Amino acid sequence: SGMVLESQSGTSGPSLAARHEVEIRNRGRLPYGEVQIRIVYRAGNGKVVETRTRKFPETIAPGQSLKPGDFRVEGLPGSAVDAEMSVAYADIATAPEAARPGSD
């Protein structure tokens, strides 16, 4: 994953917007859907300054990846310098008929 921070001015003072690029890989044996990622933003001293979540409704088949494209998170504290992403939640999805074993 990658992140670019951009300055933003608002009514409550300066803040940041982060543009993220992410790839979610399914290394399991079941399809997953409704994947929710947690993004933890940290200051230069390592202190957590903000935590956000983002949901992706697409289904990811076993062995496949999802590259949903860039997304933007606004209103972050000006002290944020780094972010760490992790999967917070994912549903086990039903595989499409064509992808099920023995369906050919």
Image (tube, helix red, strand yellow):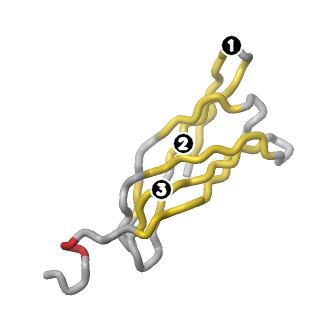
The foreground one among 22 and 97 is 97
Residue named by callout 2 = 20
Q: Amino acid at mark 3?
A: Glu
Mark 3–mark 1 CB contact (< 8 Å): no
Distance CA(mark 1)–CA(mark 2): 24 Å
The foreground one among 12 and 24 is 12
Look at the numbered disc 2 and give the secondary structure of its residue: strand
Q: Amino acid at mark 2?
A: His
Residue named by callout 1 = 11
**85 relative to 52, above or below:** below
Distance CA(mark 3)–CA(mark 1): 34 Å
Q: Earlier in the sequence, mark 1 or mark 2?
A: 1
Q: Earlier in the sequence, mark 3 or mark 1?
A: 1
Left or right: 53 in relation to 50: left
Q: Residues within 10 Å of mark 1 (few under 14, many from 20)?
A: few
Quadrant in which the C terminus is drawn: bottom left
* Dot in front, 3 or 1: 1
